[in-house]
Image (cartoon, helix red, strand yellow):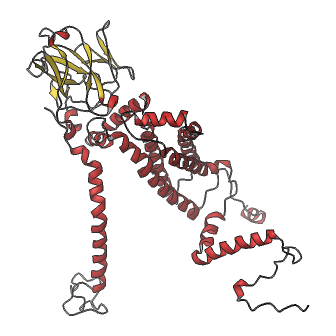
Amino acid sequence: MPDKHSKHRSKYTLDRGMPGAFEGETVTRRRFMTGTAHGAGAVAAGAFALPALGFAIGPVFKSTPHRWEVVGTVDQFPDNNYVPVVITLVPNIGDVGKSTAYVRKFNPEIDTDAADVDSHTPYIAISSRCAHVGCPVRWVDASERFICPCHGGVYDLLGRRVGGPPVRPLDRFYTRVSGENVEIGPRFSVNSQLRRFSPRLPGEPVDGIGQYLYPSTPGAKKL
Amino acid sequence: MPKLPAPPLPAPLKTPPPRPGSGNGKKGPLDDVAQAGITVVDWVDERTSLSGAARWMMFRKVPKGTNWFYTLGSATMFAFLNQAVTGVFLAMYYRPEPAGGAYESIRYVTNDVFLGQFVRGMHKWGSSVMVVLVFLHMARTFFFGAYKYPRELNWVIGVVLLILTMAMSFTGYLLPFDQRAYWATQVGVNINGTGPLLGPYLSDFLLGGAEFNATTLSRFYAIHMLLLPGLIAALIGAHLYLVAKLGTTAPPWQKAHRRRELRETEI
């Protein structure tokens, strides 16, 4: 009988002295049947588990179409103060899909940073979603600050953080002028120099290494 | 009139002889009821051998010094059962519709359904009770050193149960769908998103997309009432099995008892 622990074991079951071995056989029938049954079980389990899993995590990888929404006429928005408008982020689910944006006209004297000096934003539309954990900020005219009620985040006129826990400026929306109407489009995030980034969730910094640690997900595709 | 002989019944159908101490052979209706119960239990036990398992589970040796702190685990399980039962009945009325239906159904349960406010209150306050009990149970285990060998795996299962309980609280918080529920969920999901690399994907998974959308509420509802309760029930089973298998620990102040003559010979 061959040594069980020898490195040069024969691959034939007959040589290894297994009971019921056949000539030229390398896998016993028992082992083969066990493997087949386990394999069939794995296929059957995978047949329902994998589609169910994909079904559950599928929305993560689905990109939603961009929406443009009319929020007012061009003469409605001054260039030195914000006008709140209600926009619909997700249609057909009532108030839950709505959010507030603060809109003013592009002002070349104050909007000198990178995000503003391009044709994407003839109007500045700032999202009310706080960049800390997503509470709704409000524009306080008297102090010229956006203030968050939850944890005390404070932002200046351009949406840059001036106090509290937020990790980046307030998000913005693309805007465009169509005839007499101002339209608001998809969201984008900005870093502390107001450079444009793909939309991120609140609490995710985009300065430095942050933009790589917190990737933009396919559902929030940039324009 | 002479008495007829008894018919030749098979052994299981014959009335058994009276047990010692059960009266002087006379049988009242209560004895028949008791006998019926015994017969049913015996019938089941003969086919399942469940009585051995029940004895193994319930009649365990318990160390000296066992006290009220040892009931915190059972109390937690009772809180979970309360959540399960009240949750099942709340699900009969709840509608996970974001466009007003969810809030309206909760309002209906609270204001209009008979005992609705009570059952909803049991579920709502019971969740806080369960979290408190989980932590007290955990503290008892920690301070009594009951997590040490050979019970480490039970500690690990307990930690998973703690996380699942937290996940239950988080997903259940959205369901009333009022302002607090909505904003707390926004904050909670965004906190999940602050984990590097995978965080943004976790957020999208929880919301079912990039924004709070039509499926978010039903997703939370399904996780809350189908996925997590199943996991928790299964892990409670494993937790209890290990408790029964390994036994409980004596409290740390309990000294080993030694016989007097042994103590004297040691000196």
Taking depth in this image into account, of B211 and B90 the one nearest to the observer is B90
Q: Quadrant of the N terminus of chain B?
A: bottom right
Taking depth in this image into account, of A188 and B105 the one nearest to the observer is B105
Q: In this rendering, is residue B196 above or below A80?
A: below
Residue B152 seen: no
Q: In this rendering, is residue A101 above or below B2?
A: above
User: In the image, is B242 to the left or to the right of A199?
Assistant: right
Rendered location of residue B122, percent (x, y): 57, 40
Q: Quadrant of the C terminus of chain B?
A: bottom right
Rendered location of residue A23, percent (x, y): 20, 93
User: In the image, is B247 to the left or to the right of A84?
Assistant: right
User: In the image, is A215 to the left or to the right of B250?
Assistant: left
Q: Give the residue displayed 28% in from the left and 63% down from the top.
A: A46
> In this view, which residue lies farthest toward the front?
B1
> In this view, which residue lies farthest toward the left?
A119
Q: In this rendering, is residue A141 above or below B84?
A: above
Rendered location of residue B45, percent (x, y): 62, 74
> In this view, which residue lies farthest toward the top?
A142
Residue B84 seen: yes
User: In the image, is A25 to the left or to the right of A132?
Assistant: left
